[in-house]
Image (tube, rainbow, N blue to C red):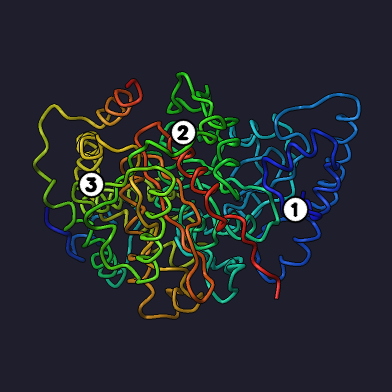
Amino acid sequence: MSAEPALMSLTSVAQAIAQKRFSSREATQSCLDRIAQWQPRLNAFMALEAEAALAAADAADAELAKGNNRGALHGVPLAHKDMYYDVGKVVTCGSRIRRDFVATTTSTALQLLKDAGTIRLGSLQMAEFAYGPTGHNTHYGPVHNPWHIDHVTGGSSSGSGAAVAARLTFAALGSDTGGSIRMPAHFCGVTGLKTTVGLISRAGAMPLSQSLDTVGPLARTAQDCALLLGLMAGADPYDPTAVAGPLPDYTAAAQEPMKGLTIGIPTAFYVDDLDPEVARIIDETVAVLKHEGARVVQVELPDQRQLTAACQLVLAVEAAAFHKRWMIERPQDYGPQVLMRLQNGLAIPGVSYLEAMRWRGPALTAHLAAVAGVDAVIAPVAPVAAPTIVESDVGNSPDAEALIQRLTRFTRPINYLGLPSLAIPAGFTRSGLPIGLQLIGRSFDDAMLLRIGAAFQRATDFHDRVPKFA
Amino acid sequence: MTRPTAKEIKAMADVAGVPVSADVAARIANSIGPAFEGFAPIAGTLSFDLEPATFVVVQAAEAAK
């Protein structure tokens, strides 16, 4: 066992607390010590509630002493992206507009984690209204990458990526509408699960696009993601889009071997225009997959550029519709880049939006047919490692907009198709920046991705590496 | 599918109740152009009976396998 509880995985720390090998207070204090060290450098937390967290930890320890174990995550301290409503708490959504918004409900996903015994460390930074892929935030400043503080974390779940990577929280909720879990997982070297649309309730989570939004975890391992998914997945009377039905045992799936599975690697699009280091890491990953007993075959996917375009049409219109009132009443309170993205939705005719929505079924059918012979597809999350904060600042760099478009082109098709995708740490550049790859699955087969991801992590140590505080 | 011009975008924003300047309309036209062009091969080709809920039907059929 690590001498520093904060360095343990979520699964390990939950077991250690349950078995009274150390207390919830010790785990919480360990996280708070690291937050005190890292937060001035990272800007990962939006709000820190140290005293309340320690009091909750003491209460959890007292309960456990009486034999009352509340659930699988009893006494485990967590922090989440500041867009999950928690009754009585300020939930800024990374914005000036909601700087003082106090939630009157608690999101279903968050409540399920509370019911499992988690305690709250505070809330995590994010891109304004989750509408940005880099980690910049006009109002609260950028979140810094713990592997190299001059580089971005990716977004929009920027604080979640940085905080999990620096071991400030054992896991964190993010959200993924166009890549917002996978991008920070890739840039920060953590594991992130973009779930199938409809698998986890979105009730009480700030909306960006009702067709594309997904709730999901960022954690240190696929096993940790499996534990969290098992607690959160399923139907919810407060979200009719959350699908009812039997759910697999995700943690059991994550213990299955990779042997005998078939993994597809795309012949085009996802292998085009890659940084040589990303290409190298794909090759190295394929070698590991084969070594672990998987068969790796080429797959020819339908035109992904059309999926990206359809995703952009849907996202732009739905985001503009959610924000229309504030765009009229408070345009000055948006960051300029976010307002620009929202304004884009005004220019898309209703017929074009509905065509993009109507095509979603046939597009998914075509994709599923193309991957009929494989259990998952492996692809890069982005063609490059984390860019610097300066070069990705749209306000200051003339090339930033083109860079941002390039960053998101491998994630958006998956959102349009509503598919699950697991981002896993797969290597490092020579300059020490993490590179992640995404495993793309079939609808509601999130368990398969966790199985492959966990098996990959049993054979590698990229997910165990911790950025040093230099 | 033709990408809208800045002039058309200005008119659409006015109708939507969120007026934008000519400069902003020009910026939007440039920004959303690639999405229109990317979707052009699909636009106008979808069959009559297709509706957005088909996506959920395909998802459910896959989940049932």
Spatial CA span between label 3 and label 2: 21 Å
Q: Looking at the picture, which amino acid does disc 2 mark?
A: Ala
Identify the residue under disc 1.
Answer: A6
Q: Mark 3 vs mark 1: tell me if same chain.
A: yes
Q: Is residue A377 left or right of residue A206?
A: left
Which chain is home to disc 1?
Answer: A
Q: Mark 2 packing: few (<14 Cα in 10 Å), some, or many (20+)? A: many
- Which circle's residue, 3 or 1, is located before the other in the chain? 1
- Image point 74% across, 43% down: which residue? A13
Answer few, some or many: residues within 10 Å of disc 3's Cα (few below 14, many 20 plus, some between 14 and 19).
some
Element at label 2 = helix
Residue on which the image places disc 2: A447
What x and y, as percent, mark residue B59?
32, 29
- Where does label 3 land, which residue? A299
Query: Which residue is depicted at the point 46% across and 27% down?
Result: A242
Q: Residue at x 85, y 48 (%)?
A: A26
The residue lying at 42 percent from left, 49 percent from top is A291
Specify the subunit that label 2 lies on.
Answer: A
Q: Earlier in the sequence, mark 1 or mark 2?
A: 1
Which quarter of the figure has residue A104? top right
**Is residue A383 shown above or below A9?**
below
In which quadrant of the rendered image does the C terminus of chain B lie?
top left
Residue A449 horizontal side relative to residue A410, left or right: right
Q: Which mark is first along the chain, 2 or 3?
A: 3
